[in-house]
């Protein structure tokens, strides 16, 4: 099964949306295999958002991401990276489709509630950035036969 990183941004915490957002992934059938709360700092954001360094909004983005703690989650499921990314919606929340997390809870390109990994390769690198092997919990998935066909694993 594929794993992906979701970061509930400081705005999700401050606005009391943590439960709502986590609930969406749970109800979809994704499996939560690691989770922690963390205050991010500039050094980790320089790595995590390296592709955006030099953009005019980069300092604002970092201020927003350090304004309060974040919730880091690893979700597991068949093709979880693309499933979770679609659930987040477009980066600019004003363009995000209703029914997506950003389309339902946000109005901003920056303050857009969640980060989600954008590829399988980046998901692995991002998970390694924020989690250690001992952070992952291994537990049975007794409902998998009701969530997936035998070849969906
Ligand atoms: P990006 O990796 O392009 O998008 P996504 O989060 O959907 O994978 O951008 C990372 C974050 O940078 C984005 O979630 C919010 C911020 N950002 C802005 O504030 N303004 C922008 O115009 C863009 C493209 C991103």
Image (spheres, rainbow, N blue to C red):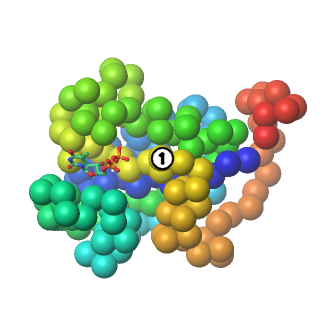
Q: Where does label 1 land, which residue?
A: 118
Ligand 1 within 8 Å of disc 1? The answer is: yes
Q: Which secondary structure, mark 1?
A: loop
- Rendered residue at 68%/63% (across/down): 137
User: How far from the left and from the top, in percent, is residue 143?
Assistant: 77, 36
Q: Is residue 142 left or right of residue 116?
A: right
Residue toward you, 149 or 147: 149
- Answer few, some or many: residues within 10 Å of disc 1's Cα (few below 14, many 20 plus, some between 14 and 19): some
Instruction: Name the residue furthest bottom.
Output: 43
Which is nearer the eye, 17 or 2?
2
Vertical placement of residue 28 versus 81, above or below: above
Q: Position of residue 79 (x, y in %)?
A: 65, 39
Can you see residue 43?
yes
Q: In the image, residue 148 lies at what x, y percent?
A: 77, 30
Residue 77 position in % (x across, y down) = 67, 42
Which residue is at 27% across, 59% downward?
52
* The residue positioned farthest toward the front in the image shown: 54
Residue under the image location 67 percent in, 48 percent down: 2
* Residue at the image point whose x is 33% and y is 21% from the top: 98
């Amino acid at each position: 099964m594929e794993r992906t990183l979701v970061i509930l941004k400081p705005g999700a915490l401050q606005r009391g949306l943590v439960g709502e957002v986590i609930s969406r992934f749970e109800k979809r059938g994704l499996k939560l295999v690691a989770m922690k709360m963390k205050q991010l700092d500039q050094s980790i954001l320089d790595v995590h958002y390296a592709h955006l360094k030099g953009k005019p909004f980069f300092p604002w983005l970092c201020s927003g991401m350090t304004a309060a703690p974040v919730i880091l989650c690893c979700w597991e499921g068949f093709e979880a990276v693309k499933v979770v990314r679609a659930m987040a919606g477009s980066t600019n929340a004003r363009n995000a489709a209703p029914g997506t997390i950003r389309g339902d809870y946000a109005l901003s390109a920056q303050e857009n509630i969640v980060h989600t990994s954008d590829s399988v390769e980046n998901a692995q690198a991002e998970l390694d950035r924020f989690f250690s092997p001992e952070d992952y919990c291994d537990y049975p998935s007794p409902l998998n036969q009701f969530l997936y066909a035998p070849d969906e694993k």
